Amino acid sequence: MNSAIDTGRQETAAPAIELRGISKAFGPVQANKDISISVAKGAIHGIVGENGAGKSTLMSILYGFYKADAGEIHISGQKTAIPDSQAAIRAGIGMVHQHFKLVENFSVLENVILGAEDGPLLRPSLTKARKILTELAAEYELNVDPDEIVENLSVGHQQRVEILKALYRHADILILDEPTGVLTPAEADHLFRILRNLKNEGKTVILITHKLREIMDVTDTVSVMRRGEMKGTIKTVDTSPEDLAERMVGRKVLLQVDKAPATPGENVLEINNLSVIDDQGVQRVKGISLNVRAGEILGIAGVSGNGQSELLEVLGGYQTATGTISVNGQEIDLTGKFSDGQSRRNRGIAHVPEDRHREGLILDFSAWENTALGYHNAPEYNKGALLMDNAAIKADTEAKMERFDVRPPNPRLAAKNFSGGNQQKIVLAREIERNPDLLMIGQPTRGVDIGAIEFIHQQIVALRDQGKAILLVSVELEEILSLSDRVAVMFDGNIMGERQASETNEKELGLLMAGMNEEAN
Amino acid sequence: MQKMPKWADIVLIPLINLFLAFIISGFVIWSIGKDPFAALNTMIEGAFGSTNGWGYTLYYTTNFIFTGLAVAVAFQARQFNIGGEGQAAIGGLGVALMCLMIDWPHWALALPVAIVGGAVFGAAWAFIPAYLQAKRGSHIVITTIMFNFIAAALLGFLLNGALKAPGMAAESPGFPEGATLPTFHDMLAPLGIEFSRHAPANISFLVALLCAFLVWILIWHTRLGYAIRSYGRSETAAKYAGISPTKIIIVSMLISGGLAGLMAVNVTMGEAERLVLNSVEGAGFIGIAVALMGRSHPVGVVLAALLFGFLYQGGAELSLWEGIPRELVIVIQALVILFTGALDNMVRNPVERMFLKLRKGA
C-alpha cells in the first residue's frame, strides 16, 4: 500500500484518484478492508481479483452507489464526498457498467443527453450533442451513428455509446467494469485503442477485469485485490500473468491446461442440419451440422448470443428443433414425447448448463437436493415405488463432494451459500460421475475462481481421456483454445468454420467469431 | 452463511410477530374503553378453558388445517391458490352427494366414500384453473378467484333447485343417520374422558392430522414432491432437469383442490349434516394466512391453524361476553395476518442483525 502512494507521489501532479482506508461491510461480510489506492493522472490502471474480492464494491463506492463505512476519497488532490452518482459525475467520474444502462429504443443521441439535458427543450441539447459527438468520434475513434436506434447497434457499438455518455458529461476518470466480456477479440482490440487514445488525451482509465491478458496488454499499473484486501499495486511491466494469478489466489496456479493429444474414436454425437426457432419466432440456429467423437473435446467458440445456448438447450431436451441429432448412432427425439431432460439423461447425455444459478442449481435447495436434480428418478436415489431415499442421496453427495473437493463438504448447506467455484463443482460432480457418453459443458469456468478453474479443467480432460465425447461451449477464447482438441466457431446461428485447436490461433478464430469480416466500423 | 439459527426463523420470529399483533390489538380494545387483559382472558378461557371451548377451537382448527395445507401444497409449486373457498364449497357438494347417495349403515363406511367425494370434487374444481394456467397461461390467481364466485353461484342454484329440501331454507335434506361422524364426545367417552356433548369437533380432526402427515411425506420424501419443490423454486432448473411444468402445475393444483375439498367432511358431514349455503365461511381465505404463517410446512400449518382456531373461537366468546363488536374481532384477526404475513420482514431484519451482532461478539 505504501508503494501505491509512492507511485502517486512520483508524479508531478496530484493523483487523479486517491482512496484512503476505504472499508465497507455487508452484514458479516467485510467486502472492503482498509483499502488505499492511488491512480496517477493519464494512466490506465487495472484492478484484478477473483469473484468476491471486492472490486465491484470498491468501484460502487467510488461511483456513489454505496457509502463507505470508513475512509476518504480524494479526486485530483481534493477530498471529495460522493454520496450519489450525480456527485460522482460532477467530480468527473464516468462509469461503463458490465450490463449497459441504455434505453434500447432511443437513438444514440437521445441516450447521450438523457439526464444531461440543458433545458426543457430538447432541440438545443441534441444539436450540441451532435457536434460534440462528431468531435469525440474523430478524437478517440469512437465512431457511432448518432441517429441509430441503440437496439440496432452491435454490443461493441453500444459500449461506445456508454463511453460517449461519460465523456459528454466531462468525465476525466473512466471506470470500465469487465468491458470485454461480451466483445469479439477484434472489438476488444478496438476498445483498447480507444482507451489508449483517452489516455493520450490525459484521461484516467480504471479497468476492472478478470482477464489477465488484457491487464498485461493495456494497463500501466495494476492493483490486485483478494478477499476484500488490497494486495498491492505494481507496474504492469514488472509483472506477468502467472505472478498476478498467484497474487490473486494466494498460491501458485497452473494457467495452462496440461493434456496429452487426443485419440478420437467413433462418432458419439452427430448433428445434421439443425435449426432452432425460439419462442419469439427468431431463428437462432440455422441448419448447422457437427460431430463429436469419443475421446475428443469439441469447443464451440463465439460471442454469446450467436446460437450456442440454443444448441445446448436442444441437446438438453428443453428446446424443440428441426433436423436430426444422433447419439451413438441412434437418433434422439427433438420435438415429441421424448424430447425432455429425463430422456436425454437416459441416453447418456449429461449437461453442465451455462447458467448454474438459473438452470444447473436450485439455489434454495441444499447440496444433496441439488445432487438429485435431473436424477431424482435414479433407482439408487429411491426406495420402493413412492419414496425417495434421502439418506442415500446425502451419502452419495458427501462422497461426491469429497472427490471433487467441494468446500465446505456439507451436503446440507444450501447451494446459494457456496462460492461460485464450489457451486460449479457440485454441478460437475453430479454430471461427470454419471459416467455419460456425451458431456455438454457451457461456460465451465464463468464466475469461478482461478484455483477452481484449474481443477475443473483437469476433470474435463480426465473425462476425455476415459474416451468420452465432450462438447464445450465457452465465450472465453483462451479457454476454448487451451481445452479443445477441435474448435467450431458459431456466428449468427451458423458454423463459420472448424479448426484443429493445434493449428489455429486467437486471431483466426476472432475473425470467424466476427462473421469472417474485418471489423466494420 | 446462515444468517440465524433455524429455531429463530421458525419459532422466535412468528412469536414476536404475534406478540406485536396482540399489543396493537390490546390498544385497539383499550381505545374503545374495554380492558384488554380481561378480553385476552376471555378469549383464552373461551377457547381453551372448557372441553366445549376446545371442541369449537379444534373444529375451526380442522377447517384451517385443510385449507392451509391446500394453499401450502400449491405454494410449494409456486402456484397461488386463492380458490380454496370455491374448492371447499364444491367439495361440500361432493360430500353431500356421497352422503345422500345411499342410506349408509355405518359412518365407518360413509367416511372414506365422503373423503373421496370431497377430494375429487375439490380437485375437479381446481383442475380447470390449473389447466388454463398450465396450457394457456391464464393467471391462476385471477381464475381461482373467479371460480370462487362460480362455485357460490352454482351451490345457490342447486340448493334452491335440485338439492333443496322441502321447507324455507336453501339447504339439502339432512344426511342419513349412518353418515353421522363421531364427535370428540363419542370418541373419548369409551376412554373415560368427559368431553362436551355439544362441541362440533369430530373425527375429521384426525383426518386433518393424517393429511398433514401425508403432505409432509409427499413434499419431502417422494419424487413428485421433489419435482414440485424444484419447479416451485426454479422453473428454469426444473425444465433443465426434465420436470414438466404442465404436469407439476396441474398435479399440485389437483392435490391442493382436493385438500380444500376435504374441509367439507368436517363442516358438512361432521357438523351441519346437510349441505347449506356458504358453509365455508371464509376458511378458504384464512387458509392463505395459515399457509403463510406456517411457512408452507405441514407442522407450521397445523400450529398456525390452531392459532386461528383459537382466534375464531376466542373471538366469538369476546363478542358474546365482553360486548366487543364482532367487527373488532375481525380487526384482531386481520392484525395477526398483517403482522405474521405482510410485515414479516419488519421483524425479521432486525432479528437477523441482532443474531449477526451476537455471532460477531462470540
Image (cartoon, rainbow, N blue to C red):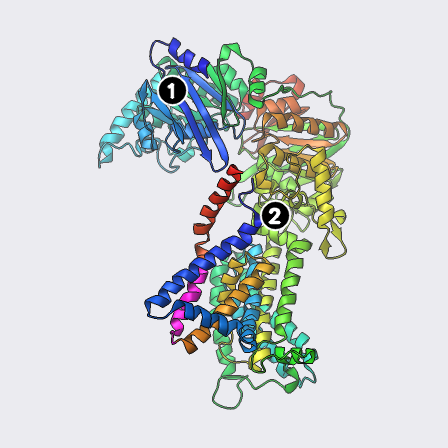
Residue nearest the viewer, comparing A500 with A1: A1
Chain letter for the residue marked with disc 1 in the picture: A
Pick out the residue farthest to the bottom: B167
Instruction: Please report the residue visible at 65 percent of the width from the left and 38 percent of the height from the top.
Output: A427
State the residue position of label 2: B238
Residue A10 in picture, x, y percent from top left: 39, 9
Tags 1 and 2 touching, CB below 8 Å: no
- Is residue B296 positioned above or below A498 on the image? below
Residue nearest the viewer, comparing B213 with A452: B213
The part of the image, by quadrant, that contains residue A50 is: top right
Instruction: Please report the residue visible at 61 percent of the width from the left and 38 percent of the height from the top.
Output: A353
Q: Which mark is residue B203?
A: none
State the residue position of label 1: A18
Residue A334 in picture, x, y percent from top left: 65, 45
Main SS of the magenta segment? helix
Does the magenta portion include B142?
no
Identify the magenta region. Answer: B323-338
- Is residue A52 positioned above or below B9 on the image? above
Chain letter for the residue marked with disc 2 in the picture: B
* Disc 1 element: strand
